[in-house]
Image (tube, rainbow, N blue to C red):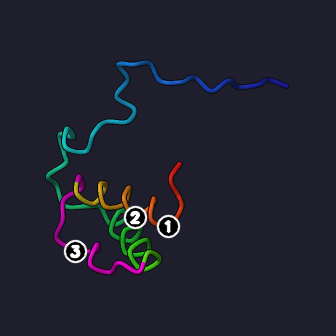
Amino acid sequence: MATTTKIEPGPHSNLEKDPSEWTTGDDPMTDAQASYLKTLSEQAHKPEMFAEDISKAEASKRIDALRGDVGLDN
């Protein structure tokens, strides 16, 4: 049976890029982001964190913040 080894990203990896640096960061958030953001904002009792007219980058930042609020930080 073959085993797989997880390879940690190097210091110059773009695996986790700051949302403000995304080339498509100004595009409207995706349907998946909207759904997840809505769910997290409800779970965190912070409905004001959800808005339908935000960018992908802003949605990502809000999702990260809310994940911390509901105890889902990595």
Q: Is residue 1 magenta?
A: no
User: Image point 14% across, 52% down: which residue?
Assistant: 26
Mark 3: few/some/many CA within 10 Å (<14, 14-19, 20+): few
Which region shows up in magenta? 45-57
Element on which disc 3 rests: loop
Give the total of numbered labels: 3
Main SS, magenta residues: loop
What whole-number distance in Å separates the C-alpha atoms at marks 1 and 3?
A: 21 Å
Element on which disc 2 rests: helix
Residue 6: horizontal and vertical position, in percent? 62, 27
Mark 1: few/some/many CA within 10 Å (<14, 14-19, 20+): few
Element on which disc 1 rests: loop
Q: Residue furthest left?
A: 26
What whole-number distance in Å separates the C-alpha atoms at marks 2 and 3?
A: 16 Å
Q: Which residue is mark 1?
A: 70
Work out whether mark 2 precedes mark 3 in sequence or the reverse, and give the earlier one: 3
User: Image point 77% across, 25% down: which residue?
Assistant: 3
Q: Nearer the viewer, residue 48 or 21?
A: 48
Q: Looking at the rendering, which quadrant does residue 48 occupy?
A: bottom left
Q: Which residue is mark 3?
A: 52
Query: In the picture shown, does residue 37 fall above or below 73?
Result: below
Q: Is residue 56 magenta?
A: yes
Mark 2: few/some/many CA within 10 Å (<14, 14-19, 20+): many
User: Image point 23% across, 74% down: which residue?
Assistant: 51
Q: Looking at the rendering, which quadrant does residue 29 occupy?
A: bottom left
Residue 47: horizontal and vertical position, in percent? 32, 81
Q: Which amino acid is tagged 1?
A: Val
Q: Quadrant of the N terminus?
A: top right
What whole-number distance in Å separates the C-alpha atoms at marks 2 and 1?
A: 6 Å
Q: Which residue is mark 2?
A: 66
